[in-house]
Amino acid sequence: MLALGIILHVAQGFLEASILPVAFCIAGIAIAFGFAWLLWKAGVWAGGDVKLMIAIAALNPINPNILNAFGITSPSIQLPIFVISLFIFSVFAMLPYGAFISAVKLQKNHEQKKAFLLDARKKIFSTIEYCFAIIGMGFILMYFNLPVLLDIPLLFAFGLLRKRVLQVGIAVAVFAFALLQDMTASLQWLFLLLFFFLGVWLLFKLYFLSKTLLRKKVNVSNLEEGMIVSETFIESNGTVSKAPEIQIKNVINYLKQNRLHELSDYLNPKGRRIVSSARAAGLSLEEIKELQALAKEKKIGENVSISESVPFVPAVLIAYVFLGLAGDFLWHWLFLL
């Protein structure tokens, strides 16, 4: 792909009697290499991801924007930064892709499936209640010719109510008022809001659930090169410990309580990292040998938690097709600003 991209752009430059196609190709390769190398050093990408992105940059230094070839105008930035756009949209594509994989895995895990369905049932009822409140309060505000934006502080106050019975009673009462005002519009808004809120919840719930569903315990003697550990081992003062798993709610609590020093230790534990869950390339042979030695010395357990890797390439394909058809909306928006 790299060689083909260079050859095609040289041929294009020759046919058009212009140096620009070759210059854009070289610039795209250089930008892709620098960007991908930084992600590789940070442990976000493995070596294969870096090579793939450089090869794509050689073929498409600029957003391909296929629709323009058919006369359908869509925004696109004529700069050799397509790979950066591709990475950003690939991250977004991982959300539905990861949720789909999680849904497939969930069917085989009866315990997790039962817990998920129980959680979903609770979420459906609470969402219906809040949709009742949103629609009902909105109609009340319109009835008295008050700004609809007042719905936000009213909903906030509604959420602060301690008594569950009172919340349900208010939600049902205000929605009944909305039905009396305009039954068709109220029901339409109800279905739209339910579809949106439950859809977003389902997407994120399945995606974050994949972190649990894609984990398994592997004996240290059976570890193989490239396996991705889901736990980080830290050596400090001769002792080995597991670093706490980073969770957004814990980070928010540290920030709320202004415990910035503890937050720093939480995000970056002191000591030598033996293996890290953030390393996309997975375990090296040297790291496997060290883990096995530590297990023999009883400094760690005999089993290590491993994450089944989710292929990144399908997400890249989804992003590539989207950008190719829809243009580079991200950079177009940024340049407009």
Image (cartoon, rainbow, N blue to C red):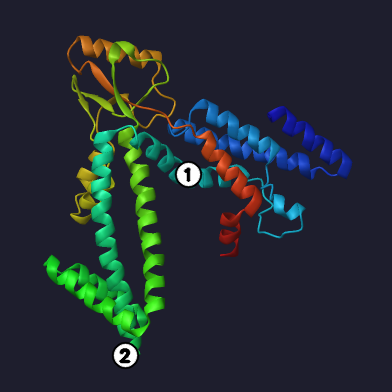
Residue type at mark 2?
Answer: Phe
Residue 251 shows in the view: no
- Of the numbered discs 1 and 2, the one sitting upstream in the chain is 1
Which residue lies most toward the left here? 163
Please give the count of numbered marks on the rendered protein. 2
Q: Is residue 94 above or below residue 219?
A: below
Q: Answer left or right for 4 relative to 88.
A: right
Which of pointers 1 and 2 indicates the residue nearer the eye?
Answer: 2
User: Could you say where residue 140 lies in the image, as x and y percent from the top left?
Assistant: 30, 84
Determine crowd level at label 2: few under 14, some 14-19, many 20+ residues with C-alpha closer than 10 A. few
- Residue 196: quadrant of the picture: bottom left
Identity of the residue drawn at 61% across and 49% down: 323
Residue 51 point in image, percent of width and height? 59, 29
Name the mark on residue 144.
Answer: 2
Left or right placement of residue 307 versus residue 16 in this view:
left
Q: Amino acid at mark 1?
A: Val
Q: Is residue 209 left or right of residue 299?
A: right
> Which quadrant of the rendered structure holds the C terminus?
bottom right
Residue matched to label 1: 91
Image location of residue 74, percent across then percent down: 67, 59
- Residue drawn 66% across the image and 40% down it: 28
